[in-house]
Amino acid sequence: MAERLSRSRSRRRSLALCAPLLLGWATAATAAPDPAEEAAQLIQRLRSGSPGERIRTLERLTELGEAARRPLERALGDLDPDVRLHVLHLLYAPEGELERQLRQIVDGRPHQPGASYPLALRAYRELVGEASPILRDQLLRVARRAAPRGQERLTIVALELWRACLLSEGKPRVRDGQLLGELFSFELGAAGDSLLDALGALPPKQRLAALRTPLSRLEGLPLARAARALGEVAAVDQAAEGRALLRPLLGARDARVRLAALRSWGLLAHQVADDSLPIVRLTLDPHPEVAREALRQAGDWRLVVAREAAERLANDDQRPRRVRAEAVRTLGLLGEPVSGKLLLALCVGKDRELSLLASWALGALRAPEAARLLTDQIRQGEAAEPLLFNGLARLGGDAGRNALRIFQRLPEQIPGDEDQRSLVEERVQRALAAGARLDHPKAAADLCAFLEQLPRRRGYPSERSYEVACEALAERGDSEAARLLLEHLEQPSTFFYLEELLEGVGRLGLPGGEGRHERELERLAEISRHGQARGLGTNRARQLAARALTRAAPAMARGVLAPQVTSMRGANEVQHAMARCLGLLGAPEFVLERALPVSQRRLRDARGAERVTALNEVGIDQLYAGQFSDALISFQRIRWVKPNEWYAAFNAACALAHLGRKDDALRLLRRAIRFGSKDITHLRFDHDLASLRDDPRFARLVAQVRLARETNLAIPVWPLPRQPQ
């Protein structure tokens, strides 16, 4: 009996000790059930519950949100049609409402009257204010549905909103990169650039992680898109890792993949010491576009090991002309004298395009016979070909300078025949323009020598000749050119080219301080006050003089412009321009009070295509006011209507440069050039891009644009060739 009582007490003590533990387990299981299991149980209730119970079940499934998505997707195949209907509503009703909001943004088009556009902007801000991981997933699903249907603008807005939400929330997930990587399977069109921007918003490591799966699993054009994206979004310190991912693709069977991988390889090569063997090997690729791209990179990087391949291609009559032309350009850039014999033979060939380009290449090689050959070709009737004058500029030294000076001078005897006079002036203008690229310490002085000529007689020389000389000085951009531009304000012939002169001073500023040029600066101040400039409208003269004074003498400009802006009554173009100048001088209150409200009012009142221009003006005012984030949004809004506008991409790059996002700014600059931006002087001297000028990638980009203009061989751009060979 005692033993039975002892065992009973022992069992009771064990149960007493275990009870709290068992109760804790039960409480934990009840308090924190697995959301997926709970969703599966709730879906079971949809099949058999009463109407009231079904309503409570639907409310609970809605509360579970994204955690219930997988069980709901499995329930789409349920045999009960009522269950399928409820599941469809739960899955897609929120995204349907989101898509409706996105369509409101898309349909708020600038050519529509009324308040639709402001409503669209309000919807954009509201969605960004609700940023969350669930919203980002929904936005990507909307993009996935819109892309196959060819709804590019809807896809653009969804991806740009996704990027804005991520930057606002600041909490990227691994899942974000995976979902973005899946979009490479679709033909996105203009929305492909928005996908690159979205990838660029991820941390650098996640960008590469997002691209690994597409690069390993896709093929054909989708794989080419992913390869192209790698070069655009990889950070500088990821160059080696990026090239390792690209190396297998350089030998792909599809030429589109090889070309995309090669272009990305060039973007990831940040110094000459980077591996150049793949570039040299692909110069002999059977596809002409791949060979051209390899030759272009070999020339840009001065890869002497590619000389033999370039000579072989240049001398091969069976190759397409565009490949041979790129090979000739590469030979000129490589600077190997042994190529001179081949280039001389091409100069006398029957193919005129190759002949002119070979002459330029001889000048670039600085061959002994280049000056005589180029001069003879110009005199024999090739005056309209800038390549020949650019060849003399490439020749440089005294030989190149003396040859250019021959054609920069006007003959003392005015040609009587109008056609002959036009031919002579055309030669002069080509020679003046080439002076912008001449490597000689006296090149700027030679351009000024033309500006100092006596005023024209009987319309000769034309105003255009003066303008070309002035533009060439501004393009040179050195301190000597800036000084000479400012000093020519008092020249007798200034009124022929005053607009170009003021624009040049406004871009280059004044080296060496303000004290040495008091007379010229006072002349600028006088024009800004009264606009008394012969040959130029009053308002235009005042605006240009204000910009020139701002760059040449910032301290003086603030004292001159601020009283003028304050005293003006009513909005006008002069006040607007001067307020922007004061914003540049560190007084954004003038822009906020006198310029930005006017631009915003014009945006509200604009109709038709004017709205895009008005929106661009709002963004520019925001830049001058220091509101860089708002300016970036304004320029991105233009993409909702015109995705391929170069000035929107260029101005967005300026805003990104101010925000310190160099990688994004450089990507937008490349995009602007692809869309048609060709103003090399603006690219080099725009004050908004000052933070990029020390970056070697920016210097390479400027050099590529200059070379493309000089040789008339365009930089290869996307899209890739459709049919591989």
Image (tube, rainbow, N blue to C red):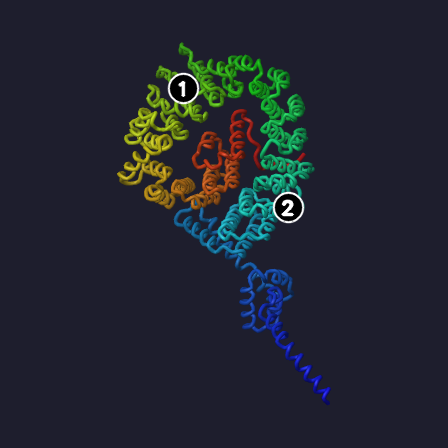
Residue sitting at x 36%, y 39%: 586
Where residue 318 sits, quadrant-wise, is top right
Q: In this picture, is 383 found above or below 120?
A: above
Q: Nearer the viewer, residue 419 or 483?
A: 483
Type of residue at label 2? Arg
Type of residue at label 1? Cys
Q: Nearer the viewer, residue 606 or 538?
A: 538
Horizontal side of residue 347 vs 682, given as left or right: right
Tell me, yes or no, if residue 209 can be seen here. Answer: yes
Where residue 354 sits, quadrant-wise, is top right
Q: Which element is circle 2 on? A: helix
Horizontal side of residue 670 vs 258, given as left or right: left
**Marks 2 and 1, the one that precedes in the sequence:** 2
Q: In this picture, is 531 found above or below 209?
A: above
For the C terminus, the quadrant is: top right
Check contact, mark 2 vs mark 1: CB within 8 A. no
Give how far across and how far down residue 219 sits, in percent: 67, 43
Q: In this picture, is 267 found above or below 397?
A: below
Give how far across and how far down residue 619 sits, in percent: 41, 42
**Which mark is on residue 674?**
none
Q: Nearer the viewer, residue 97 or 373?
A: 373
Horizontal side of residue 279 vs 615, given as left or right: right
Give how far across and how far down residue 477 sits, in percent: 44, 27
**Which residue in the structure is indicated by mark 2?**
212
Q: In this picture, is 28 found above or below 258?
A: below
For the N terminus, the quadrant is: bottom right
**Which mark is on residue 448?**
1
Residue sitting at x 44%, y 25%: 478
